Amino acid sequence: MTEQNSRQLILLRHAKSAWPEADDHDRPLAPRGRRDAPAAGRWLRDADYLPNLVVCSTASRARQTWALAAGYLGCAPQVINDPRIYDGDVPALLVVVRETPEPVRTLLLVGHNPGLQELTLRLAGEAAGDALRRAQEKFPTSAIAVLTWQGPWSQLVPGAARLAEFAVPRGKPPSS
C-alpha cells in the first residue's frame, strides 16, 4: 500500500475528573485533570501526532480535556462532539471510526474507559516495544494510544493496526 493509504488513530482518554454532586455526563475535570490535559496536548505536538479530525465525547470532562489539550497543538482540526463516544463499546466506536471521511489521515477520539482501552487492544495486531503490555495493564486518565495501519477507514478491522505508541502525559503539580 502507498503512503497515501496510511492512517493514524489516536485514542485519548479524558483527564482526571472531579466527583461533585452532578450527573456523570456533567462531571468536570479535577485540578489534576486541568494539569494533565495540557500535557497531553504538548505530548501530541512534540510527537507530531496532529489530528485532521477530532471526534469527542459529549461529556463535560472529555470536552474540557480536548479544549485544554488543543491549545498546545499549533493547529485547529475540525471537532465533532459525538454522543456515541460517551459510553461507546468497541462495536459502537468502530462505527464512528469507519465513518471517517477518507481524506482524513489522522483521527483523534477523546473518550472514556473501558471503551478506549478495549478498542486499542482489539485493533492492535502488533505493537512497538512494551506498548501493548502497558495498554493491557492500565489505560489511565490522559492516556494516549496511537494506532497505525494502511487502508481506508471503512475497512479497519480488529487486529489490523499496529500500536505505535502508548503514553500517559502528566502535568506538573503547582509548587508549594
Image: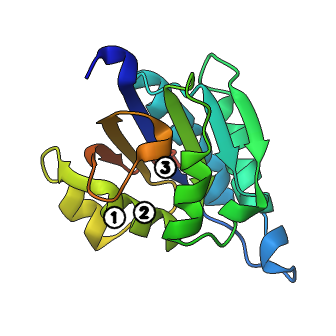
Mark on residue 119?
2
Cβ atoms at labels 2 and 3 below 8 Å apart? yes
Task: For the N terminus, give its image quadrant.
Answer: top left
Q: Residue at x 33, y 59 (%)?
A: 158
Judge whether 107 appears above or below 168 on screen.
Answer: above
Question: From mark 2 to mark 3, how far is it between C-alphas?
Answer: 9 Å
Q: Quadrant of residue 151?
A: top left
Which structural element holds mark 3? strand
* As drawn, 128 above or below 122: above
What SS does tag 2 mark?
A: helix
Residue beneath disc 3: 11
Circle 1 sits in a helix, a strand or a loop, which is it? helix
Horizontal arrangement in the rendering, residue 47 relative to residue 12 (left or right): left
Residue 76 at least partly seen: yes
List x then y, in percent, for residue 176.
58, 51
The residue positioned farthest toward the left in the image shown: 129
Q: Tags 2 and 1 in contact by the CB under 8 Å rule?
A: yes
Q: Dot 2, how many residues are within 10 Å of its Cα: few (below 14), some (14-19), or many (20+)?
A: many
Pointer 1: residues within 10 angstroms few (<14), some, or many (20+)? some
Name the spot of residue 105 as percent of width and height, x first: 49, 25
Q: CA distance from mark 2 to mark 1?
A: 5 Å
Sequence-wise first label, 2 or 3: 3
Which residue is rendered at x = 18% and y = 49% of the image?
127
Quarter of the figure with residue 128: top left
Work out whether mark 3 precedes mark 1 in sequence or the reverse, and give the earlier one. 3
